[in-house]
Amino acid sequence: MYIRFLFLGYRIFCFLFRPVRMGVRVMMIQDSKVTLVRQTYLPGWFMPGGGLKRGETLDQAARREAFEETGAELGKVWLMGAYTSFKDWKTDHNLVFVCEDFKITGKPDSEIAEIQSFPLDALPAGLWPGHVRRLEEYKTGQANPQFGEW
């Protein structure tokens, strides 16, 4: 409940100040399945990810977020592309990384309600539209660095 209250406060902040943010998402795929998370404060399924911390590289942020949200240690990661969203009164720039070499060694933090792997041809209802688009690009071999709408 506390996290939902903080999230509401953040939405009010965004309305007033229109921030520009940079974040990462990690498309974790093994055996033709993608690992997704369901958060405690937002409905739906997401690729693990979040915002960069001061002094952190993009690679470090992707690895940290994947570990915090899934308990996964990532092997090789590669950049799929950079995407922008202007939803909810803010400008979000998201860099999407792909990792096909990971091992879940830990547990997620308290903001994650559930972790599950889904076949690429049977994605769950409630998966956010930008995530659906990125997974479709991956499946059709269009996964390469590019710029587009999140």
Image (cartoon, rainbow, N blue to C red):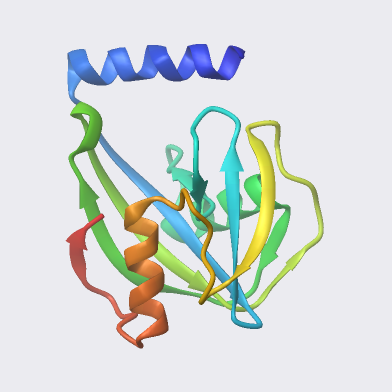
Q: Residue furthest bottom?
A: 141
User: 68 or 37: which is nearer to us?
Assistant: 37
Judged left or right of residue 95, residue 48 is right
**Residue 56 pos. (x, y %):** 46, 47
Task: State the image quarter where residue 10 is shown.
Answer: top left
Judged left or right of residue 37, residue 108 is right
User: 37 or 109: which is nearer to us?
Assistant: 37
Compared with residue 64, is residue 8 higher up or lower down, i.e. above or below? above
Residue at image position (26%, 54%) is: 150
User: 76 or 134: which is nearer to us?
Assistant: 134
**Residue 143 pos. (x, y %):** 34, 80
Q: Name the quadrant of the N terminus.
A: top right
**Residue 70 pos. (x, y %):** 68, 52
Compared with residue 64, is residue 86 higher up or lower down, i.e. above or below? above
Residue at image position (53%, 58%) is: 124
Task: State the image quarter where residue 116 is shown.
Answer: bottom right
Compared with residue 75, is residue 108 higher up or lower down, i.e. above or below? above
Compared with residue 85, is residue 98 higher up or lower down, i.e. above or below? below
